[in-house]
Each structure stands twice: as structure tokens, then as C-alpha cells.
Image (cartoon, grey):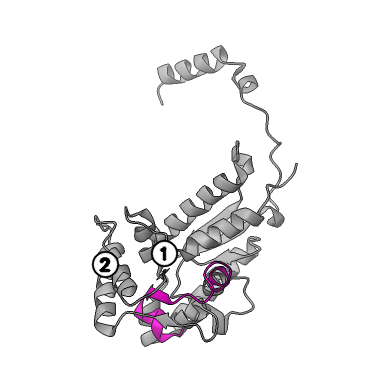
């Protein structure tokens, strides 16, 4: 940096010597402690879906808590573990590399003080539940089941999900025992998977936000009362699309809203 630039900066600092006095005083910074962390997010599965969840989390906190300052937002650690293997491929071929890497990443968040962890990938929950019950991971399918029980008891439920989620039996956990669940036929599921992996997960993105709408319509045609967005990319695009979403269930949005309802800013 040149001397002239340095001189200009010094002059501006001197001319604005009382700048700090114009900034509203906040609580003095506290030394980092584990108990300061409110939530951990183990993401990267996929990256855009993780970003979507964080946006939903902030929006839900703003609606519920109406924060006026930075310090009135939750302290959230977000880990983009994008190197984790694809979940459907792992379920079909070899689950161990994914399971080992997932546990390592979850433990890293726990070591940093995260009291609970949200994993914004529904297919990953097929691995989490049977092998990692000791981890404080928010059970997305069970959260959705409780939401449906309270808001749409007895509904005929359609689920848009990946092949891995279906094969692992996660879909059944979205509803209570005995409740009817409808999924796409295998050929239509293949079409859905192609949109997820060839467009929604691509850096080029999915220009048509309603592209998943036709799959939801196919479940509506099968007399489903509600349709669960059982894949985070599906939720991300349906939630942002222009169509009516009154009969759509968004798991990540529900988790974000429940967190915002129960969380309170730390006192000084």
C-alpha cells in the first residue's frame, strides 16, 4: 500500500474519531465457549440445498424472533462436507466409506460444541438412524411425521424422493404406522432422479423453478392429499417456485420453523 493511501486512511480515521460513539453499544464480546453454539449443520449434500436450509433458518428466526441486531441471531456452525460420497450410490454399492466419513464430520461438529445437528439431506438419514443413534442428529422424517400427525391426520401422503431414500425405507418413516404412502412408479422415479442429478445439482442450475411441479402433479393425480418434498433439492425448487404450495410438505422448512420457535437469544 502506498504512503499516499496510508496517509488518506489515517486522515479519515482522525476525522471520524467519534465514529465508534455512533454505533449502538452491544454486549461486549465473550470468549468462545462451547455453550455459545446453538446448532450445527452438516451440509454439502448438496451445497445449494445446505444454503437453502440456512436461508430458511434465518427467515424463520426473523419471523418468530424479529431480531434487530446481529447478536439476536443464533450461533450456527455450518460445515460444507462436499467430499462425502453420493448417498444413493453408497446405499446401492458400499455404505461404509460414507458412514465413516459422516461420523467423523458429525463428531467434529460435536467437538466444537454443537448441541444438535441438522443434516439437510434426507437420503443421508437412511444411514444416520440405524448406525448413529448416539449422535444428536435431528430426525427429519420423524419431525415430518409429527407435523402430519398434528396438521393432516389420516391424509393420503405422496412422497417425492430419491431411489436411495425409497430403497432404504426412509419414506415409511415420514408417516405413522399403517398410514398410506404413495411414491412414483419406477420409470417416473428415474425421470425424477435425472432432473435432480443432471440439473438441480449442476452448477448451471435449474432455470425452471417449477420443473419438479409435474412430478408433484402426478402424485396429486393419484389422489394424494399432501406431497412431501422428500429430497432437499426438490424442496429447494418447489419452495421457490411460482406454484401453489399449500399441499406440499417441506421438511427443512418445518425443522427451521421448529428451531426458531424454541430458540431464544442468549442473555448478557
What percent of the width, then of the height, locates residue 130? 55, 84
| Circles 2, 1 touching at the beta carbon (< 8 Å) | no
Secondary structure beneath label 2: helix
Whether residue 99 appears in magenta in the rendering, the answer is no
Residue labelled with disc 2: 214
The answer to whether residue 212 is left or right of residue 138 is left
The residue at which mark 1 appears reads as 247
The reply to whether residue 100 is visible in this rendering is no
Q: Which residues are magenta?
A: 145-169
**The C terminus sits in image quarter:** top right
Q: Residues within 10 Å of mark 1 (few under 14, many from 20)?
A: few
Q: Is residue 154 magenta?
A: yes
Q: Which mark is residue 89?
A: none
Quadrant of the image occupied by residue 158: bottom left
The residue positioned 29% from the left and 83% from the top of the image is: 185
Residue extending farthest right: 268
Relative image position of residue 2 (x, y in whole percent): 40, 22
Q: Dot 1 lies on which element?
A: loop
Q: Earlier in the sequence, mark 2 or mark 1?
A: 2
92 vs 217: above or below: below
Depth order, front residue of 164/42: 164
- Mark 2–mark 1 distance (CA, rounded to whole Å): 14 Å
Q: Residue at x 38, y 74 (%)?
A: 224
Q: Residue at x 32, y 77 (%)?
A: 222
Amino acid at each position: 500500500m502506498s504512503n499516499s493511501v496510508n496517509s488518506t486512511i489515517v486522515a479519515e480515521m482522525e476525522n471520524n474519531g467519534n465514529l465508534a460513539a455512533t454505533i449502538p453499544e452491544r454486549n461486549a464480546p465473550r470468549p468462545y465457549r462451547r455453550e455459545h453454539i446453538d446448532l450445527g449443520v452438516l451440509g454439502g449434500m448438496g451445497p445449494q440445498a445446505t444454503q437453502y436450509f440456512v436461508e430458511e433458518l434465518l427467515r424463520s428466526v426473523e419471523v418468530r424472533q424479529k431480531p434487530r441486531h446481529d447478536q439476536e441471531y443464533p450461533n450456527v456452525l455450518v460445515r460444507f462436507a462436499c467430499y462425502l460420497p453420493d448417498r444413493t450410490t453408497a446405499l446401492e454399492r458400499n455404505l461404509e466409506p460414507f458412514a465413516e466419513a459422516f461420523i467423523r464430520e458429525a463428531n467434529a461438529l460435536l467437538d466444537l460444541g454443537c448441541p444438535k445437528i441438522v443434516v439437510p439431506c434426507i437420503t443421508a438419514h437412511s444411514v444416520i438412524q440405524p448406525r448413529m443413534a448416539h449422535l444428536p442428529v435431528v430426525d427429519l422424517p420423524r419431525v415430518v411425521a409429527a407435523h402430519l400427525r398434528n396438521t393432516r391426520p389420516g391424509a393420503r401422503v405422496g412422497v417425492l424422493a430419491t431411489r436411495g431414500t425409497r430403497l432404504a425405507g426412509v419414506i415409511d418413516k415420514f408417516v405413522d404406522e399403517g398410514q398410506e404412502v404413495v411414491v412414483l412408479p419406477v420409470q417416473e422415479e428415474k425421470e425424477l432422479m435425472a432432473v435432480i442429478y443432471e440439473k438441480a445439482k449442476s452448477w448451471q442450475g435449474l432455470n425452471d423453478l417449477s420443473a419438479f411441479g409435474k412430478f408433484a402433479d402426478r402424485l396429486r393425480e393419484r389422489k394424494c392429499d399432501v406431497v412431501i418434498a422428500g429430497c432437499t433439492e426438490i424442496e429447494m425448487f418447489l419452495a421457490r417456485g411460482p406454484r401453489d404450495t399449500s399441499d406440499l410438505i417441506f421438511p427443512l422448512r418445518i425443522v427451521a420453523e421448529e428451531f426458531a420457535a424454541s430458540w431464544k437469544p442468549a442473555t448478557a
